[in-house]
Image: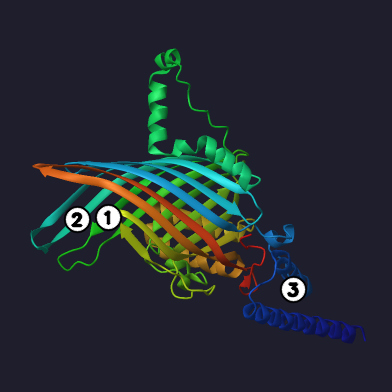
Amino acid sequence: MRHRSGGEEGQAANEYVALLAIVASVLVALVALSSGGVGSHVLAGIQRGLCAIAGSACPRAVVERDRLAACPIERRVSEERLSETIASVKLGSTGTLTAVRGSDGRVTVTLSDGSAAGIEGGAGAWVALGRRVGEEAKAGAALVWGSGRSWTFPDAAAAERFVARYGNKATMRGKLLDEVRAACSILCDALGWRPHPQLPEPDEVHAEGGAMATLSGAFGIGGGGDASAVVGRRVRRDGETTWYLRLSGKATAELGLPGAEAVTAAGGQALLSYRLDAAGRPLALGVTVAGEAAGRGALGGEGRRRAVRGGGKASSNRGGIVELEASLDLGDPDDRAAAAALLDALRSKPTALPRRAAALGARIVQRGQIDLRRYAVTTDGTRFGGELALGVKVGGSFERSTKGLTLLGAATRLPGLPFLARDDCRVA
């Protein structure tokens, strides 16, 4: 009787698991047919319920948090870029102000400085008699480096006050004034020229460096393109450190993340991050892929693009971007070993990179959290410049651009569940 009773209890548990699976499937179908979705606390609750009934261990990220991390619902990037060319040597400097508003109302503002130094060359022949005839190919390579500081504010009003006071430090004019003021400290004090306000202590700092190459195609070698690889480190005030590798193109194709088909190769970018606590213990591995929206994509909706040109180099564009972010909690020893194997391949065993990336990708698909977001994008820009070639080419340019991203939709996939819409990630 005791054996029979245990078998009946086991059967009942299996039937309950099946019932929960059916209910979850119905819920997913309703989400797919509705314009809303379910909140992050509901996603976590479903996951915990399935884990408890099935008798399996839930991922630590789900057990410890009733709510998922806030979504970045708005992002604004203002950048100024100054470049000059002497013969085949090209130098550049950038200043960038980035503001990101989360669905929890908090805003993070980042001020960044960047520099580049490289060479540029070309070959070809062309003539212009009414119209240009001929072909020309150009190629270049450069080293890039930069740094930045970030501050997080409780609301948009506090962030706007900070930008109004310190935002000019991210412009070419503001950077030049700071340098001049620093160089003439005693004289400027005597003249009454007070220094710009000093920045408060940041919540996070970052520094990065790497290389990039460009090619404009001709002579049947294709349309050209660019490639870049940048390594960097972010350090928070509490000592938490994140190392990251940013690559152009579909550099994470080997990972096979679900939803990656929504990102096209054109203009795509990939970011691999490795987060450590203040004591140097691994916390999480992250992979982010972003690129232009392909058709309706995984979240639906059509991206729109238009271009208006006038007054020389001014332009305005609208389009769409899909961002896929996957994270793997490294509290499990096997997950830590898989992440360490990939990092080891990046450092010293490039031939093993595809195989280890595929193995890590399989773990992320099975055990990681995946967030898929679609943004509407608006860009505006102005450029001034010119070149003069009399034996030696001399030129320069100044560019100012603004990019705005607004979240159209977001979905999250927790381990063991399909993608579910995030109704808590909406623009207010």
Q: Amino acid at mark 1?
A: Thr
Residue shown at 9%/63% (left/top)? 130
* Residue 313 appears in the picture as rendered: yes
Q: Is residue 163 left or right of residue 66?
A: left
Residue shown at 49%/64% (left/top)? 376
Asked if the residue at tag 3 contacts the one at tag 2, i.e. Cβ–Cβ closer than 8 Å, the answer is no
* Residue 355 appears in the picture as rendered: no
Res. 50 mark: 3
Q: Is residue 88 left or right of residue 106?
A: left
* Front residue of this view, candidates 414 and 401: 401
Separation (CA) of disc 2 from disc 3: 58 Å
Q: Residues within 10 Å of mark 2 (few under 14, many from 20)?
A: some
Q: Secondary structure at mark 3?
A: helix
Which numbered disc flags the more N-terminal residue, 1 or 3? 3
Res. 138 mark: 2
**In the rendered image, which quarter contains the N terminus?**
bottom right
Which numbered disc flags the more N-terminal residue, 2 or 3? 3
Separation (CA) of disc 1 from disc 2: 8 Å
Asked if the residue at tag 2 contacts the one at tag 1, i.e. Cβ–Cβ closer than 8 Å, the answer is yes
Please say which color scheme the image uses: rainbow
Separation (CA) of disc 1 from disc 3: 50 Å
Asked if the residue at tag 3 contacts the one at tag 1, i.e. Cβ–Cβ closer than 8 Å, the answer is no
Q: Is residue 317 left or right of residue 39?
A: left
Q: Residues within 10 Å of mark 3 (few under 14, many from 20)?
A: many
Relative to residue 183, is residue 93 depicted above or below? below
Q: Position of residue 47 (x, y in %)?
A: 72, 70
Q: Secondary structure at mark 1?
A: strand
Which numbered disc flags the more N-terminal residue, 1 or 2? 2
Residue shown at 48%/75% (left/top)? 296
Q: Residues within 10 Å of mark 1 (few under 14, many from 20)?
A: some
Q: Which residue is mark 1?
A: 214
